Image (cartoon, helix red, strand yellow):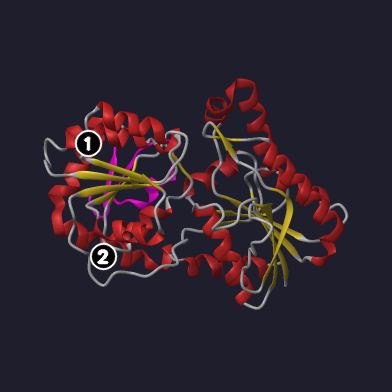
């Protein structure tokens, strides 16, 4: 089949769970014998070569900063949607199917508009479906209402859907989607530890420093948890608009010798920290999946996540078996959950790795790839 994958970011020029998903998807679908084109924004210099093995990478618009003050800017998605529309109107007959992310939504609307001229089938990944309340909080009442209406319109476009959590599959149906939907619970394409490594006395946060990730909550929790685990430290990896606030809070709480926050680090450094940390801390209020929880579990490292209406990462934690779900992101609740991990000791690390092995097939990229390829072949 001739397949067009559509996403405005390309790994490793931007780094995140969705970026890795589309990179792996394009590579593996091409390796399965299909002809694959990847439409994206140009995020590389003129002398760079964004090569993906056996995949044709086509930039349809110029790239620029995607975020401003921790929020997605509107102009890059608009340019990308226009570029996708131009490409598909001109070359739509070159594809049997188009597989796009739902967000940013203009690529979905562009693909639907191009279908009026061409006969390709449309597949849409729904990593997240935002509630009306969250849209209002994110963009204000007027902007949030517009965003929610655009999301609902995309949900009602005829397509085959892929969802990465039960939470967002349910929300997609509530928006009025009535087509075929496939649940993809597996994104992990890495290795599995033979045995858990002994825990070192530090907790790990790895992610973008934006309000939704609540990195400040971890800093605030450290003085409390150190009352129970006196030698515990924290490593905070990543960058973003809240990084300076996090560094200021570290200084204000006199935690300079306790919290290490070097910014972005190498993949090897993240791998080593995931293997050796007492636990991974993901205090996010909003997650569409939570791949880093699975990555930690594959090494026998438990995770602490927080309960919340928008947090699908809680679906990846069996409380007391591969980590804990904190009731809130308050310093007291996070500190309590981290202390429970410390009390669990080596037994919890063995339990975490056993949990991963029981769920390894379900959580694997291979399982999701098989589902995707079967959906491509299903002509119903």
* 372 vs 229: above or below: below
Can you give x and y, in whole percent of width and height, for residue 86 in the image? 83, 51
- Asked if residue 343 lies left or right of residue 241, the reply is left
Do residues under tags 1 and 2 come within 8 Å of each other at their CB atoms? Answer: no
**Residue 132 disc label:** none
Q: Is residue 380 visible?
A: no
Residue 102 in picture, x, y percent from top left: 63, 47
- 160 over 354 or under it: above or below: above
Q: How many marks?
A: 2
Q: Residue at x 86, y 57 (%)?
A: 90
Q: Quadrant of the C terminus?
A: bottom right
Seen at 15% across and 52% down, the residue is 344
Q: Which mark is residue 354?
A: 2
Q: Is residue 205 visible from the viewing direction of this image?
A: yes
45 lies above or below 80? below
- Residue at image location 76% in from the left, 66% down from the top: 96
Task: Say what secondary structure mark 1 lies in.
Answer: helix
Region in magenta? 304-326
**Residue 133 locus on image (x, y percent):** 53, 27
- Left or right of residue 259: residue 70: right
Q: Is residue 110 left or right of residue 117?
A: left
Please tell me whether residue 309 belongs to the stretch shown in magenta. yes
Q: Is residue 63 left or right of residue 368?
A: right
Q: Which residue is mark 1?
A: 222
The answer to which of 131 and 137 lies nearer the viewer is 137
User: As drawn, which residue projects farthest toward the top?
Assistant: 141
Category of crowding for the residue at label 2, using alpha-carbon neighbours closer than 10 angstroms: few (below 14), some (14–19), many (at least 20) = some
Q: Residue at x 24, y 36 (%)?
A: 256
Give whichever of 196, 220 is nearer the camera: 220
Across and down, in percent, residue 178 comes to 66, 48
| Element on which disc 2 rests | helix
């Amino acid at each position: 089949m001739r397949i067009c994958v559509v996403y405005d970011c390309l790994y490793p020029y931007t780094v995140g769970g969705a970026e890795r998903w589309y990179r792996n998807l394009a590579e593996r679908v091409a390796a399965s014998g299909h002809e694959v084109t990847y439409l994206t924004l140009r995020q590389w210099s003129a002398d760079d070569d964004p090569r993906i093995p056996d995949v044709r990478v086509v930039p349809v618009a110029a790239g620029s900063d995607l975020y401003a003050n921790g929020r997605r800017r509107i102009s890059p998605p608009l340019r990308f949607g226009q570029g996708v529309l131009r490409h598909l109107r001109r070359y739509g007959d070159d594809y049997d199917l188009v597989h796009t992310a739902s967000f940013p939504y203009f690529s979905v609307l562009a693909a639907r508009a191009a279908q009026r001229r061409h006969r390709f089938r449309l597949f849409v990944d729904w990593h997240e479906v935002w509630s009306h309340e969250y849209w209002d909080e994110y963009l204000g009442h007027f902007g949030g209402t517009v965003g929610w209406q655009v999301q609902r319109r995309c949900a009602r476009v005829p397509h085959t859907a892929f969802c990465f959590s039960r939470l967002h599959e349910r929300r997609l149906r509530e928006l009025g989607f009535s087509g075929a939907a496939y649940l993809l619970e597996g994104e992990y394409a890495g290795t599995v530890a033979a045995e858990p490594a002994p825990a070192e006395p530090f907790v790990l946060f790895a992610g973008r420093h934006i309000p939704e990730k609540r990195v400040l909550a971890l800093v605030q929790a450290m003085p409390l948890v150190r009352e129970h685990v006196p030698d515990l430290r924290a490593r905070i990896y990543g960058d973003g608009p809240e990084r300076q606030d996090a560094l200021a809070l570290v200084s204000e709480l006199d935690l300079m010798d306790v919290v290490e926050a070097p910014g972005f680090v190498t993949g090897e450094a993240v791998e080593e920290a995931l293997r050796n940390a007492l636990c991974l801390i993901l205090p996010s209020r909003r997650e569409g999946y939570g791949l880093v929880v699975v990555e930690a579990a594959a090494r026998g490292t438990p995770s602490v996540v927080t309960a919340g209406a928008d947090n699908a990462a809680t679906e990846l934690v069996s409380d007391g078996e591969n980590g804990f779900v904190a009731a809130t992101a308050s310093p007291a609740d996070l500190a309590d959950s981290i202390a429970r991990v410390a009390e669990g000791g080596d037994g919890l690390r063995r339990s975490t790795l056993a949990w991963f092995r029981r769920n390894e097939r379900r959580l694997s990229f291979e399982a999701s790839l098989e589902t995707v390829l079967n959906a491509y072949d299903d002509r119903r």
